[in-house]
Amino acid sequence: MIGACRHGRMSPGKAPMSTQNIFLQAPAIAPANRALRRHQRPCVLWFTGLSGSGKTTIAGLVERRLAELGLHTYLLDGDNVRHGLCRDLGFSDADRVENIRRVGEVAHLMADAGLIVLSAFISPFRSDRRLVRQLMEPGEFVEIFIDTPLGECERRDPKGLYKKARAGQIGNFTGLDSPYERPEQPELRLATLEETAEQCAQRVLDYLAARQLLAPPAA
Ligand code: ADP
């Protein structure tokens, strides 16, 4: 068996040798009870898009609004995770896959703890995003595509990374020499050329409210 999952759900894939003698323990407190005690419904808000598209900015605004509503959240940010949990990983395709696999497992555990998790990762590959979705209960994974054209991301270049990539100082840069696979059916698509960051954040809040994800769970 692989990886403990909420409601008995397993991480998809074949069990590696290292987990063959590992036995899942039934949780002493059911995840639904943890969420109940927090008076909220857990979910994962998965922001995906090119570097500089606005993931961190919009996720930060959403998290602040959720906190104002008294909800318990955690924002997983690509840069921060790469300084710790994933500091051994680079930007090859294989390392990007492993990066998202780890983040997906962490997001899943945090949702198990009853939190509303916001994750801001480029997460360029559809198959990786699908794997994280499969860890979650239906309706609990909200894929939010920050749809900003490459040219605009490059114009904003908030961290100066496009400039460095164009100068040949960074390789495997998403959108330039590494692919980004657009979500085909995201729960939300936010076009940052058409709406301000505040308006985009409000659209996320509206989506959550419409699906009762801001309301306390039924006891
Ligand atoms: P990412 O996390 O996707 O790499 P960041 O949030 O760090 O992107 O940077 C996005 C930049 O774009 C910020 O400087 C932000 O102020 C700017 N920006 C301009 N318009 C918008 C918008 N409508 N939504 C989000 N960010 C925007």
Image (tube, rainbow, N blue to C red):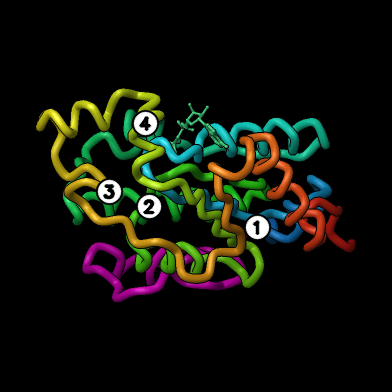
Badge 2 or badge 4: first in the primary sequence: 2
The question of residue 187 being in magenta is answered with: no
Q: Mark 4 is on which residue type?
A: Arg
Q: Observer-nearest residue: 201 or 106?
A: 201
Q: Residues within 10 Å of mark 4 (few under 14, many from 20)?
A: few
Task: Tell me the CA gap for discs 3 and 4.
Answer: 13 Å
- Name which residue lies at 17% across and 45% down: 172
Q: Which callout, 3 or 4, points to the residue nearer the camera? A: 4
Quickly name the residue at label 3: 175
Residue 99 location (% of width, % of height): 31, 48
Quickly name the residue at label 2: 123
Badge 3 or badge 2: first in the primary sequence: 2
The answer to whether the beta carbon of the residue marked 3 is less than 8 Å from any atom of ligand 1 is no
SS class of the residue under badge 2? loop
Task: Give the numbered dot on residue 155.
Answer: 4
- Name which residue lies at 39% across and 37% down: 153
The furthest residue to the right: 219
Badge 2 or badge 1: first in the primary sequence: 1
